Image (cartoon, rainbow, N blue to C red):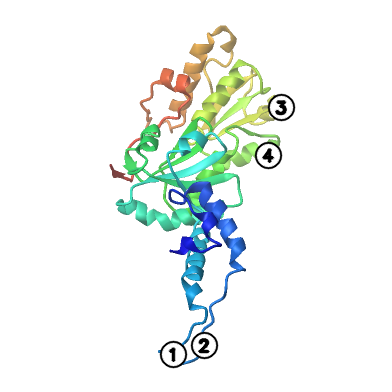
Amino acid sequence: DCFGHGILQRFRLENSFSGWSLLRYAVLLESQLKNLPRLKVSKQPFGQNRLQNVERVEVVYFAVFFLSLVKGSRVLELSDRFLDVRNEGQWFVMFYAPWCAHCKKLEPVWALVAQALYNTNIRVGRVDCTRFTAVAQQFKVNAYPTIIFVKGPYEYVYNGDRSKEELLHFVNRMSGPPVQLVTRPDSIDILKSNNPIFFTYVGKQSGLLWDVFYSAAESYQAHGYFYATSVEIAKRHFDVDTAPAALVYKERSHYYFPYSDNFERIEPAHLNESLFRWVNEERFATFPRRYLAVTFYHLVQTKKVPRAGGGRGEQN
């Protein structure tokens, strides 16, 4: 019973180690390692006394193994208490089932992602959906693994390639502001060369149209690129007749949000719904046109991102 050792008694918990408790106790345990006796291996043949301090072997072995387990993976094992802290910072979470083969295949990659993000403000964790069913239901998990970036009230489901590079690219996008500010004229040319489709707000970042544009960017951040720039910079690249305005750049041309020139005469609720619908439709290439079935009123009211169903996971 390793927990019976005097140094380790302080780490006794009623339940299993998990989450921040695991990291906190690991740090305390590591600080005590220097006080533990070291194993000494002699060169005597097998069968003779090769180990000294044999009575402490199990304690040292447990301590070393425990710390290697914690240091080997920065992934936090989350419980149902995650629902209470989900709004505290940003989270990148894998929802899994122990029997899921796809989940097991993702585990080493997920550990690398956690290691890469360890010194950032993004916490990488995982939830066993077979144990914490309430969490799985809250996040509407219906396939394994499901990967979600959580930022405040917003949930962004990842459906891309499960490589370390693509996962980190997604995190970098989601962790930044939903609307990027463009302050240099040449930046627009760079955006055109890198992004075949992107949305731009032109004018001062205030007022009703800006608020609605920003809200749409928050909801669709995982599905598009959103920028804001001044009238002076926009005039060098687009035909700007009025401001503020919202436009989409696609297929080497640009198209304005239909109500940009008279949005002040539209009811806020109708403007909200219209701009969300416009973003949802224009984020795809014109040919072939694709539409995502979304109840826009529900989207606006709940501020939930459209969850792209299906995917590469196993059904539960």
Foreground label between 4 and 2: 2
Q: Tag 3: residue type?
A: Glu
Residue 48's disc number: 1
Q: Residue at x 46, y 87 (%)?
A: 49
Residue at figure coordinates x 68%, y 39% from the top left:
186
Tell me where residue 36 appears, x and y as whole percent: 58, 70
Query: Percent position (x, y) of residue 105?
Result: 36, 56
Cα–Cα gap, marks 3 and 1: 85 Å
Marks 1 and 2, how far apart in space? 9 Å
Mark before the other along the chain sequence, 4 or 2? 2
Mark 4, residue position: 186
Marks 4/2: CA distance? 69 Å
| Crowd tier of the residue under label 3, counting other residues whose Cα lies within 10 Å: few below 14, some 14–19, many 20 or above | few
Is mark 3 in CB contact (under 8 Å) with mark 1?
no
Q: Answer whether labels 1 and 2 touch (C-beta < 8 Å).
A: yes
Q: Which picture quadrant has residue 288?
A: top left
Report which residue position mark 2 lands on: 42
